[in-house]
Image (cartoon, rainbow, N blue to C red):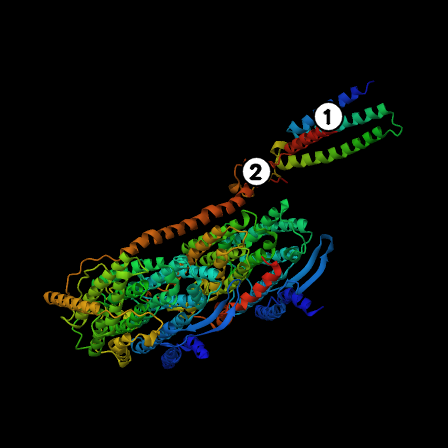
Amino acid sequence: MPLWWPLLLASLLFAIGVYAVLVRRNAVLVLMGVELMLNAVNINLVAFDAHLRDQLHGGQTFALFVIVIAAAEIGLALAIVLLVFRSHGHIDVDRLRSLADRDLDPSTSSGHRKLDRPEVRR
Amino acid sequence: MNALLLLLVLLPFASAGLTFFAGHRAEVATKGLSVGASGLGLALAAIVAFPRLGDAEPIGQVYASTSAAGPSIELSLYVDQLSAVMLLLAHSVAFLVQVYSLGYLGDDPRYPSYTALVAIFTGAMGVVVTADDLWLLLVGWELMGACSYFLIAHHWELPVARAGAVKAFLMTRTADLGLLFAIILLGIRFDSYRISTIMSGILEGGFARDELWVPAMLLTIAVIGKSAQFPLHTWLPDAMPGPTPISALIHAATMVAAGVFLVARTYPLFLSAPMALNLLAGVAALTMFLGALYALFSDDLKRVLAWSTVSQLAYMFGALAIGAYSAGILHLLAHGAFKALLFLAAGSVVHAVGSTSMSSMGSLREKLPDTFLTMTLGFGALAGVVPLVGFFTKDAVIGASLDAARDGRLVWPWLAWVLFVSAVVTALVTVAYCLRAWLLVFFGAPAPSAEPALTSEPAPRAEPVSLRDASSLGSSGQATEVAAIQESPWSMRAPLYLLAVPTAVGGLVVAYPDLLLGSEVEYEPLHPDVAVGMTILVALTAGVVVWAARRHARTPWRVPVIPHPQVDRVYDVALVRPVRRLASVVRAGDRDVIDAYANGAGSATRGLGWVLRLAQNGNVQGYLMVVVVGAAALAVAAGVLA
Amino acid sequence: MSATELALNGMVAVPVLFALLTGLFRRSEGFAVAIAVLGSLVTLGWSAWVASLSQAGLDGARVDEVWIAAIDVHWSLGVDGISAPLVVMTALIAACCLVSLVRHAPACGSRGNLAVLLLVIEAGCLGCFLAVDMVLFFLFFEVALIPMWFVINSWGDEHDEQGRRRAATRFLIFTVLGSALMVVGFMLVRSIAGTFDIVEIATGRASYDFGSPTALAASILVGLGLAVKTPLWPLHIWLPDAHSKAPTVGSVLLAAVLLKLGAYGLIRFWLPVTDPTWELLVPLVAALSVVAIVYAALACLAQTDLKRLIAYSSVGHMGFVVLGVATFTEGGVQAAVYASVAHGVITGLLFFLAGAIKDRHETPELGQLRVLYGGVPRLSGVFAFAAMASMGLPGLAGFWGEMLAIRSAVEPASALPDTTFTVLAVIAGLGVILTSVYFLTLLRGMLQGTPADPGRDAVVLDVEPLEWVAWSPLVVLTLVLGIMPGVLLSPVGEATRAYFGGL
C-alpha cells in the first residue's frame, strides 16, 4: 500500500488526540487523547518500518517501547485522577488551578477570580 | 617687630580659646583674663603701631604660604599708617568695651562666652586691618560678621534679638559675595593675592580709566553691605537688641568702619575705576540724609545712634568717593571715638533707667552727672560743635565736597554738588536730632507712664541688662520695677571719660594730620569760609530746635508716622517670600517628581510582574496550548529556513 | 614583603581581622566593642603610616600582583597625595564612630554585630581609596555597600521599622544599579585601553583613544555609576531617607565616608576617561552640580526633620565637590579633595550632634526641638560651631573647598566654555548664601527661642566626657584645616600634577 495511507491515518488520529488534550474538560478524556496521540505515533513508526524494510525492525521495537510506556503512564495518570476526584469531588481540569500564581491573601489580589479551595476528605 | 605683630594678631584668639575652656568654672579668673588680654593687646598694638605713624616705612612679613594652583595664599601681614591708626582705634575701643562690660554685664551667666566672642572679634578686626593677603582679609572680614551675629543674639530669648542677628548676618554675608568674586578676579588679573603687590601693580600698570571696573564695583557692593549703606542699611538699627557695649564696639567703631577701611586700603583700585566712585558718592549722598531723617524721628535712643552711625559712615564714603582720602580717614577715627562714647554713655543711661525708649527718660542730668557730661561732649562732637573733634573732621569732608563740586576730576560734577548739598543739609539735621535726644534724655519733665508709641517702629522695649531682667520682662516688653536711678559703677564711667578726651581735644590732631598719616597723602586745605558758614547754620538750627522744644511739653515736634524703612518690605516681597515658596516647591518636587520616578520604577517592575503572572493561571491545558503552538511555529520556521 | 606592600595590604586586612575578632566575641557586648575600638585605633595608626609613605606619583607606593589572570584583574593598591587624606579621614571617622558606641547603644540590636559591620564597611572604604585596578575598585565599592543595608535596616530609626527598611532597600538598589552601570563602563574602558589599571590610562602609558565610538559611552556609564554614589542631582533621592533613618554611627559613616567614594571615583576613574572637548558632557555635569547646590539648599529650608536637613546639606556640599572636578583643572581637583575631607569632618560632627540631640529629646522633629541653648548649652555651642563651619565661614574648614571650587569654575580648563562656567560660579556663590539662610534658620528655630516654663521639661543631660572624646578630633580638625589649608593643598596639588600629567 502507498506510504501515505497509514501516515494520513496517523496524523488524523494525532490531531484528534491533540484536540482531546487541549479542549476536553474531563480528565479521563484528556488521558484518552494522550493515548490516541501515542497510538498514532505507533502507527507512524510501524508504517515507516515497513516502508524502509528495516532489517533490525527499529520501528516495531520502538513501538513496543511506546506501548509499555503508555501503559505505565496511564496507570499513574489514572491513579492521580482518582485521588483528585476523591479530594475535589470532580475531575474538571479547568477548575483545577491550585498551582496558579496568586496572592496568598485574597483581599490583596487584584482582579483574580475566586478559585476553589481544596477540601481534604479522608 | 614682626614677631610682635604676629603675636598681636594671635593673642585675642588665644585668650578667647582659654575663656571658652575655663570660662564657666572660674568667674574672677575669666574677668581678669579677658580684661588683661585686651589690655595686653592694646599695649602690643601701641608698640607696633606708633612707630608706623607719620612718615615711617611700613613693615610687612609673610609668615606662611601655601600654593593651591594659581597664586599662593599667604599668611602675610602689612602695617602702614592706615593699618596703624586702625589698630589703635580697634584695640583701644575693644579694651574700653571689655572694661565697661565688667560693670554692664559682669553678673550675666553668659559672660564667659560673651567676652570670648568679643576677643575673637577683636582678633578678627586686627586680622582685617593688618592683612596683606586678600584671602586673609576675607577670613577676618567674615569672622567679624559671625561674631556680630552671635553677640547680637546674646539675649536670644528676645524675638527682636534673634531676628536682628539673622538679618545682620545675612545682609552682610550676601554683600560679602562681592568681595569674594572681586578677590578671585583680582587674583586672575594680577597673578597675586597680595594687596601691596596688586596696588603697586595698579599704580604702575597704566590701566585705562574704568578698565578695572568689575572688581571695583564688586568691592563697592561688599562695603555697602558691611557698612550699612543704602539699600542694605536696615540691618544696623535692627542690630540694636544686642548688648550696648557690642553696639559700641561692632556697630559704631570697628566692624562697620571696616568697609571704609577696605575702600581706603584698595584706594588705587577705586581711583583707576571712577565708575565705582560715582556709585559710592551717590549712595553716600542718599544714605547720609536718609539716616539722619530716621534718627530725627526715632523714639528709641539706641536706634537714634544707629541711624546716626549710618549717616556718618556715609560722610566717610562720600569723602573717599571724591578723593578726600585723609578727610575720610580722620572722620572715621573721630567718629570711632565719639560714637563709641555715645553708645557707652547710652548704655549707662539704659542701665540706670532700664529701658531704651526716650519716652521713659527725662531730667537725668542731676542723677547721672558723669554720663551727662560725657554724653554732652559726644553729642557736641556729633553735631559738629566747635572746638570738638567732630567739627574739624566733618567740615573737612564738607569742604572737600565743595572743592570737588567746583573743580572735581573723579566724580561727575553734578553728583559732587548733590553730595555737597546733602552733606550740609544732613549736618543741620544731625544737629537737630542730637539736640532732641539730649533734651529728651537729660532735660524736660521726668517720664510719665508709658505713652502710646507715635511711630510704627518696633515697640520700645526694655533692654535686659541682666538675665534677671530678661526673665522678668514677660510678654509686655516693659521693665518691671528697677532700682532707683543711680550713676553707673566706675568700670562703666572710666571708659566714658577716657573716650571723652579724644572727643574734646582730638581736633588738635586733625590740625596736624601728617603726624598720623604721613606727608605723602594729599591733605585738603582748611576752608575757613565753610567752617564759619557751618557754625552759623549749626547755631541757627540749634536755636530753632530749642525754641520748638520750649513750645511743646516734651518732644520738640510731633512725630509723624514714619513707616519702617520700605526697603525691608521690598526685600520681603522680592526675596524672602519667593525663596520660601521655592523651598516648599523643591521639597514637593523631591517628593512628588523625583521620588515618583524612583517609586515608579518600583511600581513598574511590580506591574510587569503582575502582567506576566496572568499567564500563570494554573490551567494545564493553557500551558500545553502554548507548547503546541510554539512547537508548530518552530517546525514551520525550521522548514522555511532550511 | 616590603614595608610598602605590608602597609598597603595591611590597611585593608587589619580592619577585616579585627572584624573577625570582634565577631568571635560578639556575645559579650562590652568586650566586643572594646576590641572593635582597639581595632579602629590600630587602623587609624596604620593609616597614618600609609599616609607617610604616600608620594606624589601613584607608582611611588604601590602593590601590584596578578590576581585573576584569566580576566586580567590585578590586586593593585596604591596611595598618593589624593587618596592619603581620604584614607586618614576614613580611619579617623570610623574610630570616632566606634568610640561613640562604647557608651551609647542603639536601641535595637546588639552592639557587637554593629561593630563588626562598621569595621567591614571601613575595610571596604579603605580598599576603595587604595584600589588602582578598576575591577578591584568595584569590588571594594560593593563591600562597603552591602553591610550598610544591614546597619540601616536593623539598627536604624527605632520608631519607624517600615521606614528604615524602605530607606535601606532604596539605598541598596540605587547604588547597586549605579555600580552595575559603572562596571559595564569599566569593561568598555578596558576594551579601548587594553588594561584595567587606571594609572596606565591616566598617565598616558596605555593609549586611550577618545575618538572611538565607545569612549563617550564608557565615560557616561562610569560617570552615572559614580554620580549615584556622590550623589549628583537628580540621582540623590536615596540620600535623605538613608541618612535620616540610619543610626547615628551609620549616618556619620554614610555622610562622611561613603559619599566620598563617589567623589574619589570621579577624580580617579572618571577624569582620565573623559575628554573635556566633548561638547555637552562636562558642562552638563558642572551644571547639574550647581543645580544640586541650589536645590539642596532650598530643600533644606523646607525640612522639618533635623537629620533630613543635614542629609540635604550633604547633597549641596557634594555639589561643590563635583563642580571642582568638572572644571578639569588642578585647582579643581584640589578643591574637590579639600571639600571632600572638610565635608567629611564637618558633616560627621553634625550627624554626631544630631544623633545626640535626637537621643536626648526622643525626636528629630524640628517642631519639637526648641531652645536648646537653655537646655543643653555646650551641645548647642558645638552645634552652632559645626553649623558655622558647614555654611562655609572663612577661617573654618568648609570655606576653602567652596572657595577653591568657585575659583576654579571662574577659570576652567581651556577646552571648556568660559562664560558658562562663570555663570555657574556665580550661581554657586548664591548657593552659599542660601546655605547660610537655612543654617541660620535652623539655629534660630532650634537653639534659640523664648524659654517656656523651666520646670516643665525633663532635665536633659549635656555633653558627656566620652562624647567629648569622640567629637573633639573632628572639632580640632575643622579648626586646623580652616587655619592651615596648606596642610592638604600642597600634597594634593603635587599628586594631581603627577597623576594627570598636566590637565
Q: Chain of mark 2?
A: B
Residue at the limit of the structure toward the top, as seen here: A1
What residue does disc 2 label? B611
Is residue B503 rendered to the left or right of residue C130? left
Residue at 71% from the left image edge and 52% from the top image edge: C71
What residue does disc 1 label? A14
Residues packed near mark 2 inside 10 Å, few (<14), some (14 to 19) or many (20 plus): few
Query: Quarter of the image holding residue C36?
Result: bottom right
Residue at the limit of the structure toward the right, as seen here: A55
Residue C133 image point, x, y percent: 66, 57
Residue type, mark 1 in image? Phe
Figure check: C241 above or below B138: above
The residue lying toward the viewer, choosing from C246 and B222, is B222
Q: Which mark is in front, 1 or 2?
A: 2
Figure check: A49 above or below C367: above
Residue B332 image point, x, y percent: 31, 70
Query: Quarter of the image holding residue B428?
Result: bottom left
Is residue B551 rendered to the left or right of residue A68? left
Examine the rendering and report whether any part of residue B207 can be seen.
yes
The residue lying toward the viewer, choosing from B310 and B445, is B310
Residue B294 image point, x, y percent: 23, 61
Is residue B207 rendered to the left or right of residue B392? right
